[in-house]
Image: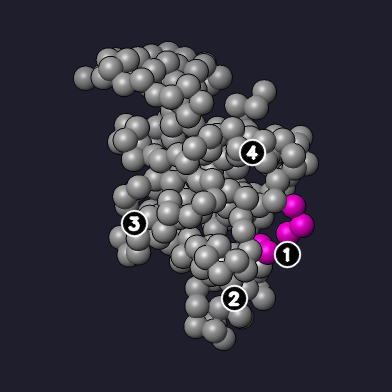
Amino acid sequence: MAEHECLRPEEIEKRSFEIITEELNRLKISLPEEEAPVTKRVIHTSADFDYVETLKYSENAVKIARELIANGADIVTDTNMALAGINKKRLARYGGKVHCFMADEDVAKEAASRGVTRATVSMEKAMAIKVPVIFAIGNAPTALIRLNEMIGSGEWRPAFIIGVPVGFVNVEYAKELIMKTDVPYIVNAGRKGGSNIAAAICNALIYGME
C-alpha cells in the first residue's frame, strides 16, 4: 500500500512536481529545459508519463508562445472546460483574453445550416479577433482540420496551435496535419489529450513567464 503524506493544500502541488521530477530521474529521462515545465504540468494533470514521448514541440515553441502571450495574444479554446481551466486572471496581466465560441447561438445555427461541426465554425469566428490568436484544442479534431485548411489556402494564419484533442475518430490524422504546417505548435501525437491537457499547457506557458 502507498504511504500517506500529510500535506497542507498549498504544499500538494509542490510535492507532486517533486515526485514527477524524482520519477523522471529514476527513469533517466532528461527533458529539454524550455519544454520541461510544460511537459511536467501535463504529467501533473494526467498522472501519465507517456506524455514525455508523445508531446511534440515545433522549434522554439515555448519561447514563441510566451512571446505571443507577453504581447497580448488571445487564446481560443474548443470547449468551455478548457476555458474554465485556463488562468484568465494571469493571462490578463499581459492583455490577453480567453474565448470559447462553441456555445454561441450564431455558431450553432451556422453549423446546422452548413452541416459542419460547431468547432469548424468556431475556428472561423476566431478570424474576427484583432490580436494574434493561440488555439488550445483539446476535444475537436475538426477544429484542427479547419485550421489546417485556413493555413493551406492562405485564408488566415493562426499565431500558434496547441493541438491535443482526445479520441479515436480523425484525432491522429488531424494532429499530423498541424505538425506538417509552418505554424508553431505543441501537439500530442496519438489518441491521448483532452481539454484538461489543453488548459494545462496554456497555464504552464503563462506561469513560466514570471
| Camera-side mark, 3 or 4 | 3
Q: How is the image coloured?
A: one colour
Kindly state the secondary structure of the residue where label 3 is placed: helix
Q: Residues within 10 Å of mark 2 (few under 14, many from 20)?
A: some
Q: Which residue is mark 1?
A: 128
Q: Tell me which residue sits at (32%, 15%) in the image.
A: 25
From where the camera sits, is residue 102 visible? no
Magenta range is 126-131
Depth check: 12 or 98 in front?
98
Q: Amino acid at mark 1?
A: Ala
Q: Which mark is residue 172?
A: 3
Q: Which residue is mark 2?
A: 108
Kindly state the secondary structure of the residue where label 2 is placed: helix
| Camera-side mark, 3 or 2 | 3
* Callout 3–callout 2 Cβ contact below 8 Å: no
Q: Sequence-wise, which precedes: disc 4 or disc 1?
A: 4
Q: Tell me which residue sits at (52%, 65%) in the image.
A: 152
Q: Tell me which residue sits at (59%, 32%) in the image.
A: 63
Give the image quarter of residue 150.
bottom right
Task: Determine whether 25 is above or below 198 in the image.
Answer: above
Task: Determine whether 92 is above or below 208 in the image.
Answer: below
Depth check: 150 or 46 in front?
150
Q: Amino acid at mark 4?
A: Asn
Q: Position of residue 62 (x, y in %)?
A: 55, 34
Distance CA(mark 3)–CA(mark 1):
28 Å
Q: Tell me which residue sits at (35%, 36%) in the image.
A: 51
* Callout 2–callout 4 Cβ contact below 8 Å: no
| Residue at the limit of the structure toward the bottom, as seen here | 113
Asked if the magenta segment contains residue 128, the reply would be yes
Q: Position of residue 86 (x, y in %)?
A: 60, 42
Q: Which residue is mark 4?
A: 87
Distance CA(mark 2)–CA(mark 4):
26 Å
